[in-house]
Amino acid sequence: MSRLVYRRARRSDIPAMAGIRARDWGTQAYWRERIDLYLTQELHPTEASRARTAFVCAERGRIVGLIAGHLTRRHGCDGELEWISVRPRYRNRGIASQLVRRLFRWFAARNAHYVCVDVEPSNQPARRFYARHGARDLKPHWMVWKDIRKAIKAPPGT
């Protein structure tokens, strides 16, 4: 396997990010617009602040995974994981775990330790992934990390 590179997302990454998100739901055009508006702070999720970020994982210059999040007051949380996606053939390699840690370090640097994520109750693979990283149920569609600093310290690949 080639070396994976993790970095902050750039606007030039948006088409590739949209392609990855569209594999899970929606169209590339929908996601191009949505990601662009989110990153340029023109799209505001409920109770979100303007402070937000996104990270990508690339192999040989090709984006293979992404994560995005923002500061919020929604459900009493400090931060919200907005999106996380990894190309199917790159799943189960620890990429999502590394992306989560990078986003959580961003949150921690802003004293945002109580972080939530909206996840369908029927999406058991996602719920198991979040639970392995320390999230617990908050509401039927929401999970929460009471202190993301614990997830940052988890061993790599978990």
Image (cartoon, rainbow, N blue to C red):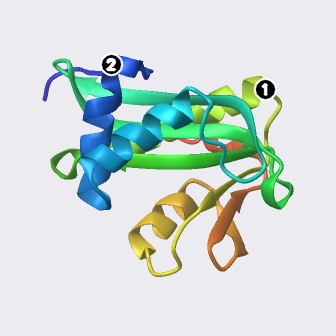
* Left/right of residue 72 with respect to residue 82 in the rendered view: right
* Left/right of residue 69 with respect to residue 120 in the rendered view: right
Residue 54 visible to the viewer: yes
156 over 31 or under it: above or below: above
- Residue 95 place in picture, x, y as percent: 35, 39
- Dot in front, 2 or 1: 2
Q: Which of these two is toward me, 129 or 40?
A: 40
Residue drawn 53% across the image and 29% down it: 39
Q: Residues within 10 Å of mark 2 (few under 14, many from 20)?
A: few
Q: Which residue is mark 1?
A: 110
Q: Residues within 10 Å of mark 1 (few under 14, many from 20)?
A: few
Q: How far separated are the C-alphas under marks 2 and 1?
A: 26 Å
* Left/right of residue 13 with respect to residue 88 in the rendered view: right
Residue 153 visible to the viewer: no
Asked if the residue at tag 1 contacts the one at tag 2, i.e. Cβ–Cβ closer than 8 Å, the answer is no
Q: Residue 12 — which label?
A: 2
Residue drawn 45% across the image and 43% down it: 34
- Residue 104 place in picture, x, y as percent: 63, 36
103 over 23 or under it: above or below: above
Q: Which quadrant is the N terminus positioned in? A: top left
Give the quadrant of residue 18. top left
Identity of the amino acid at label 1?
A: Arg
> Is label 1 in a helix, a strand or a loop?
loop
Residue drawn 63% across the image and 44% down it: 151
Q: Residue 153 — which label?
A: none
- Number of labels in the image equals 2
- Residue 119 place in picture, x, y as percent: 54, 67
Identity of the amino acid at label 2?
A: Ser
Residue drawn 50% across the image and 30% down it: 54
